[in-house]
Image: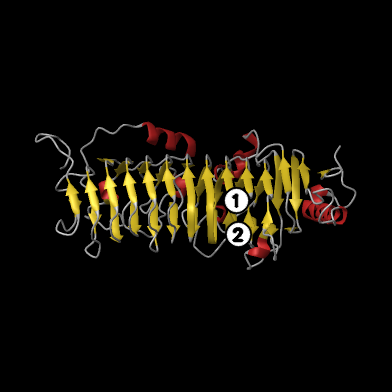
Amino acid sequence: MSKNYYDVTQWHIGDPYRDIGEVINSIISDVKVNQRELDVEDGGKPGAVIYIPPGDYHLKTQVLIDLSFLKIAGSGHGFTSSSIRYNVPKSKWSELHELWPGGSRIIVDLPDNSEEASAAAFYVCRSGDPRISSVEFSNFCIDGLHFVDDGSNERNPENTYSNGKTGIYVASANDSFSISGMGFVYLEHGLTIYHADALAIHNNFIAECGNCIELRGWGQASKITDNLIGAGFKGYSIYAQNFGGLLVTANNIFPRGASSVHFNGVTRSLVTNNRLHAFYPGMVVLDKNSSENSVSSNHFLHDHEPWAPLQGRDNGLKDTYGLLAINGSRNTIIGNHFSEIIDQKQISPAGAIPIIIRVLAGHENYISNNHIVAVKAEATSSDSCFSAQVEALLTINKADGLKVKTVVIEKRSFGNTVLDSGSETQVEMDKEVNAFRATPVPAKYYMTK
């Protein structure tokens, strides 16, 4: 066994089952004691691997990571739906095969704390040069265990998405971090990362969290790829702030988040080949002058929440806000598919015409060859989360078409181009300051033109 490989169950300080935080902090201290020299035969500080075998480990002490080249790895992300369990009557719990997430599972038992950083299971921070680098989290589960009553009049406190807990919080500038194969469940914030460079968030299961991925401060040249993601109705599934060169690709984003992708001052980035599903408008938001981004080849689906315990929520946006809303310039929106499958009686505000793509402000945006399917549907309700959503997804509604505005360019926007993304009556803009080519529509076509 390598001297730089540690098994939490074999370490001589602390009990990992009672407080894995104490154990990991002790191991990190040992790594630093054994790797003091800056340069030993062109090396000296190779870092270490900390292994977490399958099992349930309570974390009562926050883990502080302040050294590079550390990998914390388990043997299974262990995700299972806590939300479904908490909405099954307790009298039926004995009939379930299992109650809790599994794999290499860390249970966050930190004391209540209003400070976000202090409520994180893993806190990464180091000042000075060089930036902390190559910290990796792989193949284990971080479980917040319970949500709590937050004063929102939620009948079941387990549906509030609030508990103040964070899975991983990176506070300082960082380089080449990797989060892969992880499970995050029942945390108010799954991943919160500041000042990231060359960050890879890949192949994780991040769901039933208040917010899933938050890239804050600023950053560059990073990727969010091949993840299964789903935030709660009050939070972000993917949020990025002041980022350049971010790749958001091949993610399957579940429907309950307040937004699927929210860019705040993000430039020269890609949102491509994602499957996006939402129960609310504002699925993808390019805000705060987010410019020169490419949004292409994504599948957008907007429909209604079919699961009874979580019906009656919203994200505060009207259907006139747009499924894709843009406040920025020179963005490319090309080759996306939009499915607007909603109950006309539930459109907000009542009697309004829903908007699919809306440019609130900006110039020289290029919107081309987007296909919009808009069909009237009847909202349904079921006590079974899985079967209700699958049935809704597989239903090909043959009802009448739903009248929508496929593209709306607000008056303060100019120099934009809209090609083959809606008929003459479906696109609303000032054609004297924006360019337009309508999608041809057969004269006797049954859909609303």
Amino acid type, mark 2: Asn
Q: Which part of the image, by quadrant, shows the C terminus?
A: top left
Q: State which tag comes first along the sequence, 1 or 2.
A: 2
277 or 308, which is in the foreground? 277
Q: Position of residue 141 (x, y in %)?
A: 66, 44
Labelled disc at residue 163: 2
The answer to whether 113 is drawn above or below residue 272 in the figure is below
Q: Are marks 1 and 2 in contact (CB under 8 Å)?
A: yes
Above/below status of 242 relative to 47: below
The amino acid on which the numbered mark 1 sits, given as a three-letter code, is Tyr
In the rendered structure, find residue 254 and report the number of the disc placed on it.
Answer: none
Camera-side residue of 289 and 10: 289
Secondary-structure class at tag 2: loop
Q: Position of residue 342 (x, y in %)?
A: 30, 44
Say how many tags the image has. Answer: 2
Q: Considering the image in quadrants, where does the N terminus appear?
A: top right
Residue sitting farthest toward the bottom:
114
Q: Residue at x 88, y 52 (%)?
A: 13
Q: Residue at x 73, y 53 (%)?
A: 68
Q: Gap between marks 1 and 2, in whole Å?
A: 8 Å
Residue 132 appears anywhere in the view: yes
Give the numbered dot on residue 186: 1
Nearer the observer, 376 or 420 = 420
Residue 210 shows in the view: no
